[in-house]
Amino acid sequence: MGKENKSRNSVVATEMELDIYSNIFEKSPRLTGELEEYSETLRGVRALSEDIYLMLFKYEPEIRSFKELEPKYRLNGKLVQEMDQNHEIKSLRKRCEYKYLNSIIATEIMLRESVAAVNERLEKSLTLKSKLKSLNKAVDEYDKSPSDPLELEIDRYTEEVCAELAETNFFYKVLSDSYKEFVTVFNTIKNWGLDDGKLTTASYDEKMMVAGKLRKLKKVRDISEMAGRFKASASSLQRKKTKEDGMEICGVEIGNEIHRVLPSEKILLANEKTKRGFLKKYTQKELLSYKYRNNRSKSKGPIICCIDTSSSMEGELEVWSKSIAMTLMDIAFKQKREFVAVLFSYKVGQVIEFNKNRIDPSKIYDLATAFFGSGTNFVEPLNEAIKLINTAKYKYSDIIFITDGEAPLDDEFIAEFKEIKEKKQFRMITVNVSDKIEPALDQINDIQILLRELTDEAVDGTNETIFSI
C-alpha cells in the first residue's frame, strides 16, 4: 500500500504559513533542543508542533480527516482533533489568531505540557506504556513494508492510546494549564516591553530566556503587575493623540505598519487571488508605505529617566519607581523615541540606552534587577542627563526624575542647571515616591508630582502630565 496523497500535517496550511513556522522553530537552539527531547516520548512531535502552531494561528483551522494523514502521524491527528474539539482551546486561540509571537509561545507551552502529561501517565499506567510501544513498533514495520493490515493496526493502537489519555481528562488539563502558563509568560513579555513585533530566531530565544529569569524574581513580578496598571492609564491618554503626531509625509518606503501602507497595496486584500501576495509582502516587510519625518515643531524627543536606587528605595518604592519607568519606556518605544534609564544612588550606577527600533531583552533585565543601595546624590544623575542632552542623539530630551529622598543642591549647581535648561529648552518632571515635596528639586524642575497624586484618580491632569509626555 502506498503513501501517496497522504499528509504529515493534521491542519491544512499554505506553504507560506509553514515557512514562517520553520524560520523560527528550525533555527532556534531552544526549540529544536526541546523537540529532540520530546521525541523520546512522542515520535511525531516535530509535525505535532507544526499542527499546534497552525491550529492556534489560523482563524478557522481546517483539520484533516484521520485517513488523509500518513499512518505515522495519525496519533498527532487524533491528539489535534481532541484538542480542537475541547472548549478550552478557544481562550488560547483568541490570544493567538494571526499573532506570530503569541502562537509560537503558546505552541512551545502546549508541547511542554502535553509531553509532561503523557510522561506522567506513562509512569502510572503500564497499559498505556504497552500500547504506545506497540504503536511505535507497528509504525516502524509499516515504514519498512507498508500494508493494509499494518495500517489498521496503527489506527487501532492510536485510538486506544488516545482513549486511555482521555480517561484521565488529559486534553482539558493540557489546554487549561497551557492557557494559564501562556497568560503568565505573555504578561511578563508585554509588561516589560518585549513584544516589540520583532520575531527572529535570536530575538525569540532571548525574549523567552529573559522572561523566564524575570518571572523568578518577586520584585520583578510586582513591578510587572504595577506597570500593567500604569500602562492602561497611559494607553488611554496616548490614544487621544494622532498616530503620526509630530510627523509629516516625506516619501515612500517599504515596511509592514498597516496604518502607513499605501492604498494601492491595501487593495490587494480585496481579492482572494492577490491576498496571499499581500500577506507575503506583509510578513517580509515589503509593503509600499508612507515615509514620515519629524516635524520638530510638533514632535517629542527622547526621554531620560533618572531612577533612584538608594537604600531607602528598596522594596515597595522600587516597585513603584520602576513601574513608572517601564510605562515611560513603553510610550517611548511605541512613539519611536529614544529612552535612557539612569540608575543612581550616591553616584550613577548604570546608564542603559534603549534603541527606539528594537528592545534588547538583556537591557530590560538590567533595568528590572539593578539596585545599588547606599546614599542619595542628585548632582551626578542630573549631570549625566545634561551630558546626554549635549549630544546630537538626545538634544531634544526631557528628564523624568524619580526619587524618594532628600539630597543637597548648592546654589551654584542650581544656577548652572537653570541656565542650561533655559538654553536647551528641555522639561524636567520629578516623580517623588515619598509623601512630601523635595525643596531642592523644586528649584529646578517644571513640576514635582507626589506618588499619591499619580495614583489618585481624583487629581485631574496628574497622570496626563507624566504619561502624555
Image (cartoon, rainbow, N blue to C red):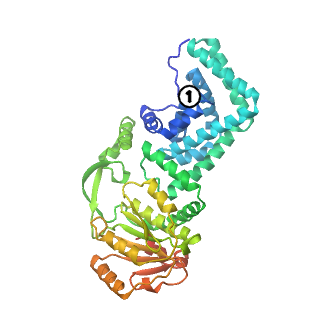
Going 33% across and 73% down the picture, which residue do you hit? Answer: 386
Assess disc 1: are there few (<14), some (14-19) or many (≥20) residues with their C-alpha within 10 Å of its C-alpha. some
Name the residue furthest left.
Answer: 251
Going 56% across and 16% down the picture, which residue do you hit? Answer: 143
Q: Is residue 13 left or right of residue 420?
A: right
Residue 142 coordinates in the image, percent (x, y): 59, 15
Quarter occupied by the N terminus: top right
Residue 258 coordinates in the image, percent (x, y): 37, 51
Residue 64 coordinates in the image, percent (x, y): 56, 28
Q: Is residue 214 above or below residue 342?
A: above
Q: Please, what secondary structure does the residue beneath circle 1 have?
A: loop
Name the residue furthest bottom.
Answer: 411
Quarter occupied by the C terminus: bottom left
Foreground of the two, 112 or 268: 112
Image quadrant where residue 360 sits: bottom left
Q: Is residue 147 above or below residue 330?
A: above
Q: Name the kind of residue labelled 1 in the image.
A: Arg
Image quadrant where residue 335 sits: bottom left
> Looking at the image, can residue 48 be seen?
no
Residue bearing mark 1 = 64
